[in-house]
Structures are given as C-alpha cells and as structure tokens.
Amino acid sequence: MATIDLWVKDGYLSTPDGNSIYFWGFSASPDGPAQVPGPHMVVQQGEQVTVNLMNTLPLEPVSIVFPGQWPVWVGGRLARPQYDPAGNLVSFADHAPPDRGVISYTFTPERPGTFLYESGTHPHKQVPMGLYGALVVRPADYDPADPARKTAYGFGTDTEFDREYLLITGEIDPELNNAVGEGRPYLVPRFRPRYWTLNGRCAPDTILPDRVPHLPHQPYGSMVMGLPGEKILIRLAGAGVDNHPVHPHGNHVRVVGTDGRLLRNDGTDLSGRRFTVLVGAGQTWDLVFSWTGLGFTPENPIPTVLPNRRNLGVGDAGWTLWSGSPYLGQKGDIPVAVVSFNEFGEYYFMLHAHEEHKITNWGEFPGGMMSMIAIYPSLSPAVGTLP
C-alpha cells in the first residue's frame, strides 16, 4: 500500500524576467515549500493508494480529484460533491476545511498510464493558482531491471523505454494570482495569461536542472536528455485551462497512449507518429521519442550547411548552444565574443508550444512554454528517471 502526504501552502513563484507571483501549491512535507506542480505521485497498478491532505490555507477549503481513478473513497464511503448552505456547488469531492483541516482519499489504480491530480474545490481558481500535479501508474509487471518490462503499459505493449520525463503544461495570469494574495477576488472573465509554463517554470529556467536552490517552489526542470537510439518516454499532461500544440523541433514522436489508455484495439496497434501533439486541458499523452539522425562521428562526414549566426543564438546576445562542430561529441571553434553553453558537443532541439505568443515571458522572446531535447555522446543512466 502506498501512502502519500500532501500539505497545501502558499508562496511566490519566480519568472526569468524577475517577476514574483503569489501562488498556492502542494508540498511533500510540513516544513517544505509549496511547489508547482505538486510532488510527482508514482504508484503501481493494483496497489492501494492513500493520499492524506493537510490544508494550511486560512480561508479556503481544498480537495483533490483524481481523473481516471474510480472509485475514490473517503472515510469508508465514496467521495462526493460538497455544497454551501445555499445549495451552490463548492467542491467536486470532500474537502479539507481551511486552517489545518485534514482529509484522506483512498483508491486503487486499475490501469497504467499518466494522469493528473488537481483541486476539485473552486477549480476555476484553485487549479490556475497552482494546485495540480501528475500521477504516474506503473504497470503491474513493471521491472526497471528488465528492459522488456521497463514499459509504460506492460510487457508486450511495445512501450519499452530507456529514460522518461514528465512535462506538465500550465498558464499564469499574474494579475489574478496577486489579487488573491491581496485578498481580492479571482475574476475568471478577466483571465489573461502572461506566462506559459512547463513544470511550473518559464524558459529559459525550464532547461535548468531539477531542484536548483534559487527556484525552491519550482523543483522540476523540463530538459529532455538521452543518447542516440534510446527510447525516451515523454509524459505530457495539460494542467491549465488552455490547449497547447507541443512539438519537438525537427523531429517526430510516436504517440503510444492518451488519458491513461494504450493506443491499441485488441491486437491492432493504433500508435502513430506525430510532428505536433495538441495537449488539451485536462488531457495526458504518452510519447516515445528516439533520435537516430546523421552526423554521429567525424568518420562519417556529411555535407553540413550551418545556419546563420542569428539562428544559433539563444537568450541574450552572444549566447549559443552551438558547439562549433557539426559532429556529436566534438567541440570546435566558435565566433569571437560568443559564449557557448554546449558542454560535450551535444545536439539540441527545441521542444515548445507551436503558438508563438506562448514562448514569451510577458511578451519577451525567448520564454514561456519552451525547453530543449539534448542528445549527448554519453550520459549517466541516472538521468531521466522518476522516483
């Protein structure tokens, strides 16, 4: 049986343009910071899961709903909606009262896949404020030591992977978030996001490692890293209120599952290659990416046309991820006054929302819902693992 404890707290998110935004989030410990997204829940198919929720918000009740999981039990009965004395719907599930109220949910995942968890209380406000996270259900026969059973959906489902990453999309309207922090109402008709996030961060913070000290409330990076030929499982989850077309620049992915369901009809494989995946609000996708491009070694010379210098830039003027060589694992000369962030001659491909206003931070490019896929000549097997 798995037991997961969560605390609801508040805090301030950081954005790369220097903004500080009030938010609500889940925390994994009574002394830890609130975070966006909430702590990853990784459990096993068929395993009973109990989630204990402690609410430290002074005025707001908070609940959790688990889309794709049924039945969910509270105190020996089914979780049920909550209403105020006037009969208005307050919550889609039993909630923890404000000011240190507690509630427990119990369920048993019946199938593997990627799912969301999020607040079911005033969700039009509490979810955009940051009360969301992801639930990963391993198949019952999952075995990370056996390549045939290190899968997303079980042995024989053609969903084996070498590394995996979880990317959760979201949007932030700082005006509305800060209004809540000042005790004013969250007016949904005025919702106008200025920031678009992957795992709670905006680019270029998205490419920083997990748990960098200066982002205590946004612990998860979004850089996808792997080796040539590896199968990389990318789990996408749409926690916001908008749909986002996400794609790996210049590459395709194979879609193997959506909303926690394997794309297979009896024995017919329904998976397929996609250049762009539309991540809908509340939706999840399981993708397998594998890079097998040319240019592995200098012994395999290929005619290479380099892009112009303008297209090699990233971030401030003079920054680049270009190694100075077209060959994987090789470093070469770079133009004078250009600072290269390429460490080992690795290849980078953008991974981003294909609606371009969403790759900005309050109108400034680059930013927003953008990260990178990095193909390395060598890489520790510890990179690209979920707990």
Image: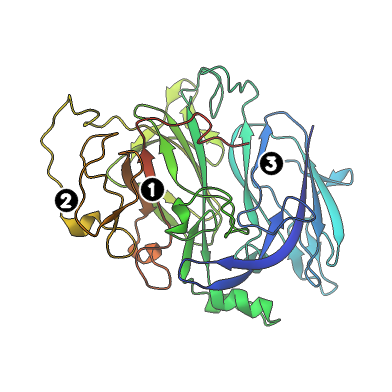
User: For the residue labelled by badge 1, is the local secondary structure a helix, a strand or a loop?
Assistant: strand
Quadrant assignment, res 256: top left
Asked if 353 appears above or below 22 in the picture, the reply is: above
Q: In the image, 7: left or right of 166?
A: right
Amino acid type at mark 2: Pro
Asked if 304 appears above or below 34 in the picture, the reply is: above
> Mark 3 touching mark 1, by CB under 8 A?
no
Which percent across, then down, holds residue 35? 65, 57
Cα–Cα gap, marks 3 and 1: 32 Å
Quadrant assignment, res 42: top right
User: For the residue labelled by badge 2, is the local secondary structure a helix, a strand or a loop?
Assistant: loop
| Residue 372 badge | 1
- Name which of mark 1 and mark 2 comes first in the sequence: 2
Q: In the image, 385: left or right of 302?
A: right
- Give the residue drawn at x 33%, y 63%: 356
Cα–Cα gap, marks 1 and 2: 18 Å
The residue at which mark 2 appears reads as: 307
Asked if 312 appears above or below 387 in the picture, the reply is: below
Q: For the residues carrying marks 3 and 2, which lies nearer the camera in this image?
A: 2
State the residue lying farthest toward the right. 75
The residue at which mark 3 appears reads as: 69
- Give the residue drawn at x 51%, y 36%: 384
Say few, some or many: other residues with alpha carbon within 10 Å of mark 2 (under 14 / 14 to 19 / 20 or more). few
Instruction: Specify the quadrant that holds the N terminus.
Output: top right
Which percent across, then down, holds residue 176? 59, 76
